[in-house]
Image: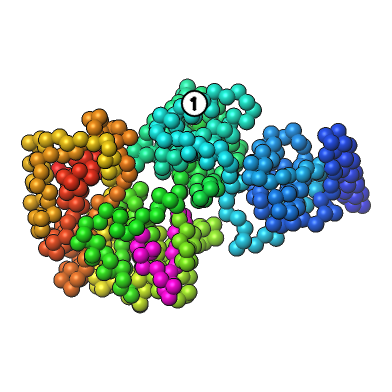
Amino acid sequence: MVLFDDKRREEKTRLFREKEEEGLQKILSSKYGLLYRDLNQTSIDTDALRIVPEAIARESKLAVFEKLNKNLKVGILSPNDPKTKDILDELQKEGYSPKLFMVSNKSLRSAWERYKDISFSTETTAGVLDISNRQIEEGVRQNKTLGDVESGIKQTLSLKKSYRISRIVESILAGAISLKASDVHIEPEESYVRLRFRLNGILTDILRMDLETYGLLLSRLKLLSGLKLNLKKEAQDGRFSIKLEKTDIEIRASSLPGAYGESIVLRILNPETLKISLENLGLDEDVLKVVLREIEKPNGLILNTGPTGSGKTTTLYAFLRKIHRPEIKIITIEDPVEYHLPGIVQTQVNPKKNYNFSSGLRSALRQDPDIIMVGEIRDEETARIAVHASLTGHLVLSTLHTNSAAGTFPRLLDLGIDPKTIGPSVNIAMAQRLIRHLDEGRKKKVPISDKDKVLVEKILSGVADKSKIPQTDYLWVPDTGDENDVAAYAERRGIFEVVVVDEEMEKLISAMPAEREIEELAKKRGLLDMKEDAVIKALKGMTSLEEVKRVIELG
């Protein structure tokens, strides 16, 4: 009986406190000039809830419970909470007009429970609010050079306004997009923080900032990306989007704890930088003919190899754009979906939902596709399913991490694939790297040194078609003479090599050969290998020999 009385007393106390809090919120609503609302008695619009993801809504102590066009009704616990203010500011930047209501903790919990009603298939995958504002668009238009970006960010850093952190984020992103940076790196040191952009594959120092600004910037980026503010000792991943006038740019955010604080890397997935046609990738004319022939085949496996950041996915996208037709069904399994291709079914791996490359490939095969692109073959199961799919009437495109095209076949053997099935399944194996091309207006000719001449002649001695070799005693370099001059390089293009699996190559692969044996047989087909392709591009003045040496080993 005593236990029963205790429970009843606790229940009465809880109800009294909840009633007391509701009364307090009513009083505070008058004090702040806001309306009061009991969300327990209110219909919650799940479309409105989606605008701010659950984790951020809970952390910011708010709930968007009604939406009519751009007009929102938002329940808040306190208008003075900094996290609440941040989210409300972002909503306004998005063009929303939030109308605020004072609500209790119980009301918020009731609204947050409705997140369970949002189906996974339609739930937004963005970490937090997409950002869209004129500041970034204006910054992209104004920034023409590295100097413009640096001075613009410095000017923003000097602001004393309360909104300066938002402006700093916008200024950094505008600068990165205008310079076509692939990544933004924010790296804390003991007494300062370094900001760097990766431009054409090279990390470039932009400026240094103070630790106080970094702390505020870190919080803002975490909020934008959907990362937990209070989690500082673990790596986190998130994302957000920027909606510009002509395109939507996705930003992948990664935080990593370090000795002096969390390092943040923002990967910029700009679809405009990925819209390169197959003909403009940089493929040698004969290699291009081989690739065009193989991607038109109804079945087989096309593998592209190279390290992270070597442009493999961009090349596969170019293949898909070339072969896509209304009568063909194409499915992709990617990590992540970097660029949306119209008319193609694209899916993204999700380890939390047990959707990885192998399970995605199995699911895709049940959809009766003609062509499947698998982001990467990482394990035996994925490799085995890909090989099986290629042997049963599907064209499969994928990537592997190897150093050369010939290394593809030993890698498949390492993954446990039967050597007798590798030859019949693989059409071609490619390898690629990205080299910076010299800006036409910022390069000059210099005589080839004796040492470089010997190296060039040695590399090109095996080229079957000598007409491909430019007859010149000159090389091209940046007009400043400085190989580290970022402005001297306009863009990156690929250097390639291809191994075609014909009947003779198939027979060799079944005998489990060494990589060198595959290279020797491939050489008889007369196609350029990667070193030859790169050196010929240097002789043509497309790039410098030093840039080639930076990317691949020539010696």
Whether residue 280 can be seen here: yes
- Estimate the x, y position of residue 330 in percent, counting from the top left: 43, 69
Q: Secondary structure at mark 1?
A: helix
Q: Nearer the viewer, residue 445 or 24?
A: 445
User: Would residue 167 appear left or right of 419 to someone viewing this image?
Assistant: right
Whether residue 521 can be seen here: no
Compared to residue 249, the image places residue 27 above or below, namely above
- Residue 507 is drawn in which quadrant? bottom left
Q: Badge 1: few (under 14), some or many (20 or more) residues near its Cα, within 10 Å?
A: some
Compared to residue 70, the image places residue 318 above or below, namely below
Q: Nearer the viewer, residue 266 or 285?
A: 285
- Residue plotted at (88% across, 40% down): 26
User: Would residue 198 appear left or right of 414 to someone viewing this image?
Assistant: right
Q: Amino acid at mark 1?
A: Lys
Q: Nearer the viewer, residue 486 or 345?
A: 486
- Residue 199 is drawn in which quadrant? top left
- Estimate the x, y position of residue 13 in percent, counting from the top left: 89, 44
Q: Is residue 337 magenta?
A: yes
Q: Kindly identify which residue carries mark 1.
A: 154
- Residue plotted at (80% across, 57% down): 43
Q: Nearer the viewer, residue 442 or 87?
A: 442
- Residue 413 is drawn in which quadrant? bottom left
- Estimate the x, y position of residue 312 in percent, counting from the top left: 34, 55
Q: The magenta stretch spans which residues?
A: 318-338
- Estimate the x, y position of residue 483 in percent, counting from the top left: 25, 33
- Residue plotted at (50% across, 46% down): 251
Q: Is residue 395 magenta?
A: no
Query: In which quadrant of the rendered image does the C terminus lie?
Result: top left
- Residue plotted at (77% across, 44% down): 99
User: Would residue 9 appear left or right of 159 to someone viewing this image?
Assistant: right
